[in-house]
Amino acid sequence: MEMRAAPGARGEAWSRRVLAMTLIVAAGFVCLVGQLWYLQVLEGARFREMSEKNRIRVRPVAAPRGILYDRHGLALVDNRPAFTVSLIPRDIEDRNSVLARLSILLKVPIAELQEMLARVPEDSLRPVRVRRDLSLEDVARVEEWKLELPGVVVEVEPQRVYPTTTFAAHLLGYVREVSEEQMKQGRYRRGDMIGQVGLERLLDEYLRGRDGGERIEVDALGRPVQVMQREEPRPGAQVVTTVDRRIQEAAERAMAGRSGSVVVMDPRSGDILAMTSSPAFGLDRFAGSLDREAWLTLVKDPAHPLLNRALQSQYAPGSLFKIVVAAAGLQEGSLTPMDRTYCTGQFRLGAWTFKDWMTGGHGHMDLRSALVQSCNVFFYQAGLKVGPDAIARYARAFGLGAPSGIELGGEKPGFVPSPALRRSQGKPWHGGDTVNMSIGQGQVLVTPLQVARMMAAVANGGILWKPRLIQRVERADGTLAYSESSRMTGQVDLSPLVWAFLRDALRGVVSEGTGRGARLPGIEVAGKTGTAQTIANSDSARGQDHAWFASFAPADDPQVVVVVLVERGGKGGQVAAPIAREIYRAIFLEKVAMASTGTDS
Amino acid sequence: MIFRIDRRLLQNVDWALLAAAGVIVALSVLSLWGLAWGGGSGIALRQLGWVGVGLGALVVVASLDYRTLVRAAPALYVAGLGLLVTVFILGRTVSGARRWIHVGPLTVQPSELFKLIFVLTLAWALTSRWARPLSRATLAWTVGLAAVPFLLIVRQPDLGTALVLLPVLAAVLVGVGLRLKVLAALGLGAVAATPLAWLALKAYQRERLLVYLDPFRDPLGTAYNVIQAKIAIGSGQLLGKGVSGATQSRLAFLPERHTDFIFAVFAEMWGFVGCLVLLLAYGLLVLRGFEIAAGAREPRGRLVALGVTVLFATQMLINLGMVTGLLPVVGIPLPLMSYGGSSMVVSLMGLGLLLSVRMRQFQ
């Protein structure tokens, strides 16, 4: 090559460097010509043949989704093989007749099939899934007509399977085909199954795994002749949760037919052992192609089955809140265990009269008996003595009015009113507000999960845990992808004497007070009932209050916290406490059984 | 002064370079027309329109003194960065990447335009009066200037375009006399820094990069393109199947056939012989570019010519390498061949720069 080198040493060096680069590029050219020679001349005939009958198809092989386990290694959800019918747009010769035939065979409206195909290019080779989880009869019918249905393929794919259809529905969440909206994020492919709520959504990245694929040669009718190359799918990671399947089942059984929520927590670690929300929805209904109407029915259901009541609904705590008032008063010194009052059944403040739930009153009351009998009049006075600021401060210390930090989406923070907050809104705080607040009415709002966290703090002496749902995530090859240990997110500072007093009073609630419905042989339960008055929308709904029972057991060595909320169920002691008893019976099965046989003999 | 084109300048126009480019552009329009054979020829006509715009840009750039452009490099650099940032704000997302911005009815790809600004910036940074070539400070400053747009383009993500910038940087640094040892050390440093960049990416972005490097991670996507491109090229055999016989391309088995994979279309239609003609034209173009660089007597001209030539050669080699299955698939167009306004206009402007250097060689 001709080089017009500039005179002088620097010019020569420059020319040399440019020449070297020219040679590097020339070497690249030589490689290219070599590759073209190989492809077009040496292998040309083979490629020519392949192009003449371009029969190479690529078929996805879905990765099995990761399995969710409970704390003892029992599966909460599993996979099973299911049949999927897909269309390969390019292979469909006569679109109208194939769709019409398929529509009759599968009993799917033809418009729905057309709509699915309209979303992808006409010459796409990528299968479009039209129906998942086919029955064997449907598969047989499609296979029978196979020759008349070019472009229709039936494949086996892993599909979620649940112990029972509504088991831990809100906690686990469901898996559903990626929506148009989610497609826009650019990280999913059409037809991907992704977790939509609950743990399935939270852990989707881990659970999904990676789809594999097959390159197959097909004949003129699109039937596979041979697999040319196969990339194995990589299964999703396995998740070990903190849930105890036995307790979850017991809690759901105990809540059958009720609307509300149960949260079971380990006060020693913050582990969520069970979390229910009812009414629930059928998880398996989402896995196949849920038709539009069924989905709308679910969304528009006035009972809101999709709502996770354990953390997405807020309720007045009712008398549960007396625990906070008592703790605040004792610690601040404005209340003592010796304070006495005579309950006549009503309490006057200015022009207003506040009633006790027991007409006629409870008679002589001290702090312990007022907690045990849930005397409102005593707490009206106590609340005024403690003051709304202190009550609000202690309520927040117990984790009320703020999200608990659980990773499940949509958690509600609840609400703790205070004079300062009210003033900032430009409204006055009245004495009546304090009176209402001291029995957990008025503006106070909590979620069942917050109550569980608060009761755990009472049980363990003040530690507020971040609720833990996931212990660890293990990849398919056994390596650890993620793990979480218990994390303390706050502490309630009360003197040991105050804790002891509270625990003793709560024990009294079950042994001799309003919570007797939760009494069990062989296991001592401590707890507090609550009845949250609701604003009646109509006369028929009047008087249907939310029933609460928040408890822990065994009272002297707390291992579990059980919180029960029954929406519009009535009185906490009559409705919620017996449900908690059934859950304890399942948790402490052996102890209860031993104690029962012991008393019999 | 700026637009002065006297006879002396016109005598030095590199006609061989222009002829080679003309052949390539003609083959591009022919291939696009062949793809649409029997249907409309809208895409070929539009490409022709872009060639017209590009030629205008080429004449303007060639008539400008490249030294003026190098002096203007800092301003161009800032404006270019502005455009790259705009992509993140106003950009249109196409298959998960933000690379384009709308200007009226057109979509512009700022990363394309930035390639030339990149070359000018390097020439400026290494030759300005106070930059003593090869001092550590100059080196660090130059690499820093290069890193900012590089990272912005990676984030789009447009890995292909970003990767093209690296050989240009390396070539220009070697050109000013950087020892290969130092270059190797810089390269190692960059490799050592990759894990940091890796941590900054989201999981699905990582996945996308991994698919770039290993197409079989995504057996339905890029691996499919590669095998179909190989079939298209191979089936062209020695003499090609002609326009009507190029079923592989025309029946749309080949994805991205107008843009990144256009060489496969060409190879199927015109066979090994046609490919040799095309490669010869590219070879001549690159050779002229290197000769212009070697013949330039003044540092700015040398660096501009070298940078543009290496930019051109790299894009061509990477694109042809990926289409023929030698390299992993990174989406970059084949300069002067692929359909696309930004790429065509910028490629022709690059040639304009080369011409500008060549024309002023003896001044």
Image: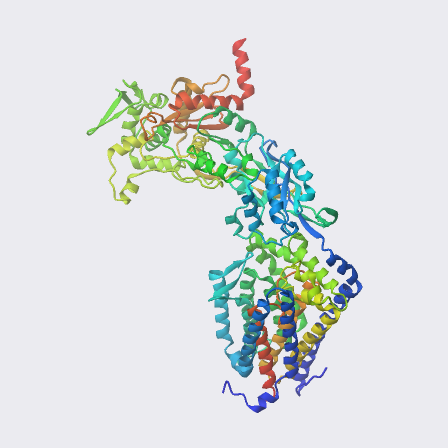
Residue at (50% x, 26% y) in the render: A251
Left/right of residue B106 with respect to residue A156 in the rendered view: left
- Residue A377 or B219: which is nearer the viewer? B219
Residue B55 found in image quarter: bottom right
Residue at (53% x, 50% y) in the render: A183
**Farthest-out residue, bottom:** B7
Q: Quadrant of the N terminus of chain A?
A: bottom right
Numbered circles on residues, count: 0
- Say if residue B345 shows up in the picture: no
- Say if residue B122 shows up in the picture: yes
**Farthest-out residue, top:** A601
Give the x, y percent position of residue B311: 62, 72
Q: How is the image coloured?
A: rainbow
| Residue A143 position (above or below residue A88) | above
Give the x, y percent position of residue B120: 55, 75
- Residue B212 or A247: which is nearer the viewer? B212
- Residue A470 or B360: which is nearer the viewer? B360
Give the x, y percent position of residue B289: 65, 78
| Residue A200 position (above or below residue B341) | above
Residue A410 found in image quarter: top left
Give the x, y percent position of residue A38: 78, 64
Q: Quadrant of the C terminus of chain A?
A: top right
Residue at (55% x, 73% y) in the render: B49
**Farthest-out residue, right:** A42
Left/right of residue A317 with respect to residue B132 in the rendered view: left
**Farthest-out residue, left:** A351
| Residue B330 position (above or below residue A105) | below
